[in-house]
Structure formats: C-alpha cells, structure tokens
Amino acid sequence: VLRGRIEAALPERLGAIAQLAVTFRAQVKALIGDPSRRRAFFRNLVDGPAGRLALAGDEVGARRVALGELDAARRHLAPEGIAHIVGAGPGDPDLLTLRAAQLLQEADAILHDDLVPAAVLPRARRDAELVPVGKRKGQTGWTQAEIDADLVRRVRAGQTVVRLKAGDPFVFGRGGEEIDALRAAGLAYMIVPGITAALGCAAAAGIPLTHRRIASSVTFLSGHSAGGAPGGNTTVIYMGATEAASVRDRLLGAGADPTTPVAIVENGTRPDQRVSTGRLGDLARLAAVHSRGGSAGPSLIIVGDVAAYAAVETPPLAKVS
C-alpha cells in the first residue's frame, strides 16, 4: 500500500526530466565553472519551468526554456519562475487532482481565492507563502488588475507560483485574463484543470447533467457579465467531429456568425493530443482535414470567440512565450 501511494505521488514523466538534464550536462559543465552554481542550475532545471514543461510533454518548450536559463546562469542572472493556474475543484479536498496536489507541494507562493476549500490549503508546502486574493460581492478585496500584477511580479522574481481557484480556472474563473497578463509579460505558465462546480455539485446531488432520454445538452451561464456588457457564448459539442457538417448547419441556422472561431480538440490532455482551429463556416472541411492527420481519438468541438485562444503548436496545458 505504501509503495503504491509513493508511486502515485510521483509524476509520471520523471524520465523526461532526467533526459533533459542529460542533454544539457556537457553544456553546463563547459559554460558554468563553479560547481555550486552548476548544482543550482540543475535544481532549477528539475523544479522550475523547464522541468514542468518536460513533465507536461512539451519537450521543445522545455529545451527552449532550459537554454534561456543556461544563458542566464552563464551571465549570473536570476532565472524567471513559472505560474501554475490551478483548479481546486468544487469543495471536497479529496477531489483535488493529483497534479494540483503535487504543485501545492512545489510552490513558493499560493495566491488563492476565498472560495478555495479551507481543507485544501494545509496540503501546501510548509514554507509556502499563502496569499488570499479573493473577491467577494459587496466586500473590498483585490482587483483583477492587482492580482495580475502580483502574479507577474512574482514570476519575474523567479518564484514558482500557484494561482489557486475554486472549481476550474477556465469556467467563470477569470483564468483567461491572468493568462493574458502572463503572455503579455512573456512569462511561462501552465494550466491545471479542476472539477468545475457545475459537475461537482450535480454529482453530489445525484443529478445527471445529461440523460439519454431527457437531456442532450448542458449550458453554463453566469448570473452577471463583466461591466454590464453582453456576454459572449461558448458551445462545446461532444462526439461532434464526425457530424461536423450537421453541427455547422444547426449553429448557422440558429443565427451563429460563420466567422466564429472553432477548435477541434482530439485526445485532450493526453500525450497524443491534437488541436485544429478554424471558423464555423468552414467546420466540415476543417474536421475532414483533421481526421486525415492522425488517429481517430475522442474529440470535441469548441465554438466561440474563446476558441481563438487554442494552442496548436504546443500543448494547451503548457505554454511559454
């Protein structure tokens, strides 16, 4: 039992980090003469942004970041850190993902919302800085701009930061705004999804959100929109890639704009993930081209302006500017 728990706590792709270290061993020895600084470089390689990207399967991104860190070490510059935008789940701390639990043990600082379950925070590293940045209706708290600025400041200073949000960071969690800030600053980040409140609460209440006989779709709505502006809509279609023409026709018939961005995500979160992007009016052709590019794994279609965020060249759970 103990062995099983230890194995479960270890990242699955540790070998990728070891291979990354081997790749850079000769260069580090040639460029960094001081043994203590060499050790510091490899510690950061394992625990820092490059190691995180290697664990996520983004070997190209990991090498790119490691090269930047090697150059910084050679010039005696402090390496930049990384931000992890993490979903804490709907409430029960046992529903925290394994990846999220691992990152809580690695973070220098955890910027957490008020809605994050109190039982989750003790799972953080003992010396991690816990920073409450929550916003509650009718109460004074951190503005989103202040959160973005603090996140950028900490990553620039070399910290490994977990931005911990209740539920899932990309479902009414304003995770997209924080990604915008990190991208604009040219900083490394990763996304760790969580069980969103709608799924967790429905399951806890014994409510199937879809049912073959009575419910074939689910809509997530916010009770308010940013600044009073009308909110856009995102539609996610499960098992729709083989029916792309029909999906397109139904959405266009309902009044959708044919220039609306779309993304087909196949084998999402897996090592063989593939993403294709285009426009709604061209969805049938996009799906046909996508199907010729590889295995016919489980796919879903995301339709809406947010689909323009899709990362095609690097895994969406690991992005480095």
Image (tube, rainbow, N blue to C red):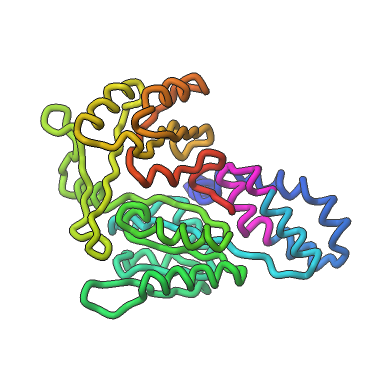
Residue 20, horizontal then vertical, whole percent:
71, 47
- Asked which quadrant contains residue 207, the reply is top left
Residue at position x 24%, y 59% from top?
229
* Left-right relation of 153 to 136: right
- Asked which quadrant contains residue 236, the reply is top left
Residue 253, horizontal then vertical, whole percent:
21, 29
Q: Quadrant of the C terminus?
A: bottom right
Q: Is residue 95 visible?
A: no
Residue at position x 44%, y 46% from top?
309
Q: Can residue 213 be seen in this view?
A: yes
| 313 shown above or below 72 | above
Tell me, yes or no, whether the highlighted magenta stretch contains residue 262: no
Residue at position x 39%, y 42% from top?
307
- Bounds of the magenta segment: 44-63
Residue 60, horizontal then vertical, whole percent:
65, 43
Q: Name the dominant secondary structure of the magenta segment.
A: helix
Tell me, yes or no, whether the highlighted magenta stretch contains residue 53: yes
| 309 shown above or below 142 | above
| 6 shown above or below 151 | above
